[in-house]
Amino acid sequence: MRIDKFLWSIRFYKTRSIATEEIKKNRVSIGESTVKSSKEVKEGDVIKIRKNQIDYKIKVIQIPKSRIGAKLVPLHIKDVTDKEQYELLKMRKMSQDYYRIKGEGRPTKKDRRDMDDYVGNDVAGDFTDWDDFFGETGDDPEEKED
């Protein structure tokens, strides 16, 4: 089986075209040499894949006939990735800021809802007299000059 089809069939990549692109970018190798998409995969091969800034290593146990379910993947490959690589991935995920920094930009809709829940009331719901809200008292300084 071709390596691009193999990586797609064991669900390492979502589509076969993504697998082909990654192979073209030299992120996939068998042994120590980079490969082309047409390279045939054999049982016993150790495939090195660079994905999410870590180096995965998988050993081919069996070649699937076509794309397989996620529960069947361990029957076809064995993960021999170094534990340090997974620790690197874990540390990177923990260190990333998934939320915007305080004071940077306007609040999102979720932020506004969270603030309203924290305060416990709707800001716009408190005002029934809009003239008082906008500070209009009915006395217009231009009318007094006449």
Image: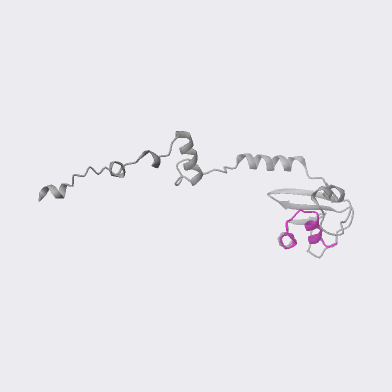
| Location of residue 112 in the rendering, given as x and y in whole percent from the top left corner | 47, 42
Foreground pick, 118 / 3? 118
| Location of residue 26 in the rendering, given as x and y in whole percent from the top left corner | 73, 59
Relative to 17, 74 lies left or right: right
Q: Residue at x 16, y 47 (%)?
A: 141
Q: Which residues are magenta?
A: 1-19
Q: Is residue 33 above or below residue 102?
A: below
Number of callouts: 0
Q: Is residue 137 above or below residue 64?
A: above
Color encoding of the figure: one colour
Foreground pick, 70 / 135? 135
Q: Residue furthest left?
A: 146
Foreground pick, 90 / 66? 66
Q: Residue furthest front?
A: 128
Q: Residue at x 89, y 54 (%)?
A: 43
Residue 79 inside the magenta-drawn segment: no
Query: Where, quadrant-wise, is the N terminus in this rendering?
Result: bottom right
Q: Residue at x 28, y 41 (%)?
A: 132
Q: Residue furthest bottom?
A: 38
The quadrant where residue 35 appears: bottom right
Report if residue 37 is visible in the image: yes
Residue 3 inside the magenta-drawn segment: yes
| Location of residue 75 in the rendering, given as x and y in whole percent from the top left corner | 87, 48
Report if residue 101 is visible in the image: no
| Location of residue 94 in the rendering, given as x and y in whole percent from the top left corner | 63, 39
Relative to 68, 84 lies left or right: left
The quadrant where residue 3 appears: bottom right
